[in-house]
Image (tube, helix red, strand yellow):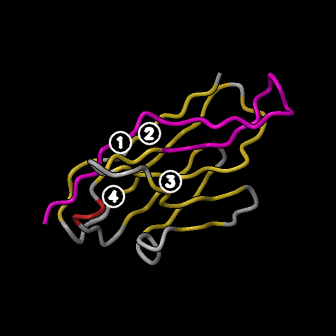
Amino acid sequence: QVQLVESGGGLVQAGGSLRLSCAASGSIFNINAMSWYRQAPGKQRELVATMISGGTTNYADSAKGRFTISRDRVTVYLQMNSLKPEDTAVYYCNARIITTHNVRVVYDYWGQGTQVTVSS
């Protein structure tokens, strides 16, 4: 069993910054990738940023130049600067994990989500 626990959301004014954290725990054999997604009201969930093992990163166009994804062992971070009202959403952590129970399968795990609200 694997759990992802997020923290760091909140209310911030436009132009401000927030740092989200997501810590994985449980029967982890290897973490192949960790990502941040977001879902705004009435919209589909969208990828914000990904970091795969080895350190390669990928960002949505809306996040480039403002957001930075980083990782420290089993914790992934999303540093969000120059926040805009359109960044308001629930942010979800995702991890692609091989567990110790079956090293031949990669599973997707999700955090519970953390609300980010940017006021204008």
The spot of residue 78 in percent (x, y) is 46, 57
Q: Quadrant of residue 107?
A: top right
Distance in Å between CA atoms under marks 1 and 2 = 7 Å
Amino acid marked by disc 3? Tyr
Against 67, residue 93 (above or below) is: above
- Badge 1 vs badge 2, beta-carbon distance below 8 Å: yes
Q: Is residue 64 magenta?
A: no
Bounds of the magenta segment: 93-120
Mark 3 or mark 1: name the one nearer the start of the chain.
Answer: 3
Looking at the image, is 111 positioned above or below residue 21?
Answer: above
* Location of residue 100 (image quadrant): top right
At numbered mark 3, what does the secondary structure look like: helix, strand or loop? strand
Direction from residue 32 to residue 18 in the image, left or right: left
Name the kind of residue labelled 4 in the image.
Answer: Leu
Q: Residue furthest bottom?
A: 65
Q: Answer with mark 2 or mark 3, whichever residue precedes in sequence.
A: 2
Q: Residue at x 49, y 66 (%)?
A: 68
Quick one: which residue is furthest to the right in this view? 104
Q: Which mark is residue 6?
A: 2
How far is the residue under mark 2 from the one under mark 3?
9 Å
The residue carrying mark 4 is: 18
